[in-house]
Image (cartoon, coloured by chain):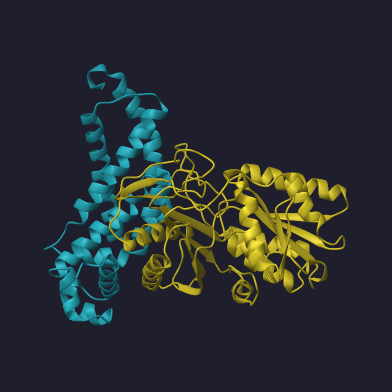
Amino acid sequence: MKKILNDVDTIVQDMLQGFYFEHKHRVAYDAQHHIIYQKDLANANQDVAIISGGGSGHEPDSFGYVGEGMLSLAVNGQIFVPPTPEQVLAAIRLVNKDKGILLIIKNFQADVENFLAAEARAKTEGRQVDHVIVNDDVSIEDDASYNKRKRGVAGTVFVHKIVGAAAREGYSLQNLKAIGEAVVSNLHTLGVALTPAMNPTQSGVPFTLEDNEVYYGIGIHGEKGYRKEAFFSSEQLAIELVNKLKSLYRWEEGDAFALMINGLGATPLMEQYIFANDIRRLCALENINVTFVKVGTQLTSLDMKGISLSFLKIDDPNWEKWLKAEGDAPHW
Amino acid sequence: MSASMITKKTIANALKKLMEKESFHKISVSDIMSACQMRRQTFYYHFQDKYELLSWIYKEETKENITDFLDYEKWEIIFDSLFYYFHKNQRFYRNTFKVTEQNSFQDYLFEHTKNLYIKIIDELLSESHLVMTGVIKQTLASFYSHGFVGTVKEWIENYCVVPPSDMALLMKHMINNQVVLLLQQTSDSSSLRG
């Protein structure tokens, strides 16, 4: 296996140093706790700091979204392992004491436990902390129940953007939490893999596919999907994912949606745009009103070839405004 | 030029929209293609004639609404979605039932509904640790699927007076009250055991 890296044990530090080298004019780096944060955090003209993070291996999420109008701080764990409560607490302590703090957490058990443990400890230090848990993954649990998995995946980036832009407009902690939760309740994501991801810290792969096979509904850490089938076109993938999202929303003609087409790590932009064009044609057939589109590699699963599709039903016109708001996060 | 599935869907959508107002016989290929703003010739890259298009709609939409959901949703929800779909498309289907030259609708709906009933029976058997021979399972699934197809057709012909959610509930009750008991009895009878 060829990978552009040196020591498996220092992957995260090496990566963060590299990012900091590129962005040190605008971000600061806490090397001890693996935190990337806005350089002018102390002077930021907003009442609430937005903190996110999670395991590494999903780049550019989340440090790539640290910037004005998006995340204030991003805390980075090891590959597919969330940051410890101590790391998250260290991030909270970097914020001025007079400011509120909103944690954006992807709904994986260990992530939720660690972030909430940090939140509880920060509160005993007199901090104003609250959180939003993102659960946009609508693939199914691996237990024959057909229950939706509800983990936090690519749609999280929409939450970063909307909540981050609203925070810059001066919304209170309580309001930002409500905005984040309303967004999450209208957000669904479903993906498809062409290949599994190779985790450099582990041997083997979480699932295997034949050369001509795709796997619908995979998760971002190699969680299993709901169906393997022979691949024949981008259109086939687009139709499958749109049909599933359509069945969940039961949308009507004219309903407004923001869309994200997300490369899962090793998907060329050319293929992402071809898929985006298929989505465009299907949305036109459905006669739904697509008011915002984001195409790109936003939240990945290491080197997985594949794509995810997120729909956000626009329930509040401000969401569209905040998605379109200017900011300086390097990977938005 | 390889046939695009989305172009096929676009052409199909144009026919479906036209058929909400016009009878199938009065609609020409030119009408369909001008409705979706494509060249008439494009139609023939994708379909031989409008009968093949109609048949493709039956086949594709029953597959997409039933078989493609078998490994994604609980069967109860598949029934809900299916009645919701037919309710939404009822004017199109009422119109197509008058097309006597092409009535593969029932064949396709039967084929995919049978897949659904097989899934249901398999899940119920596995929940109750029962076994059943393949032939008996197929017979049972066929019986219910024939009933389902006829019931759906009649419901659409009668303007879907019963709300779709009530129809779905009826199907679910039938499974929970009849099929579960039936499986136990069938499975108890040793001559039918697999």
Q: Is residue A14 visible to us here?
A: yes
Count of marks overlaid on the render: 0
Residue lying furthest top:
B190
**Location of residue B157 by image quarter:** bottom left
Q: Is residue B27 visible to us here?
A: no
**Location of residue A43 by image quarter:** bottom right
Horizontal arrangement in the rendering, residue A263 relative to residue B69 (left or right): right
Q: Is residue A197 above or below residue A317?
A: above
Query: x, y (%) of residue A176?
Result: 72, 64
Query: x, y (%) of residue A25?
Result: 71, 71
B171 and A273: which is toward the camera:
A273
Q: Is residue B84 above or below residue A269?
A: above
A233 and A4: which is toward the camera:
A4
Chain in yellow, by letter, is: A
User: Residue drawn 20% across and 65% down?
Assistant: B54
User: Residue drawn 24% across and 22% down?
Assistant: B192
Horizontal arrangement in the rendering, residue A27 relative to residue A215 (left or right): right
Residue lying furthest front:
A6
Q: Is residue A167 above or below residue A197?
A: below
B188 and B114: which is toward the camera:
B114
Horizontal arrangement in the rendering, residue B5 relative to residue A261 (left or right): left
Query: x, y (%) of residue A159?
Result: 62, 62
Point out the image quarter for the C terminus of chain B: top left
**Location of residue B94 by image quarter:** bottom left
Point out the image quarter for the N terminus of chain B: bottom left
Colour chain B is painted in: cyan
Query: x, y (%) of residue A289?
Result: 47, 74
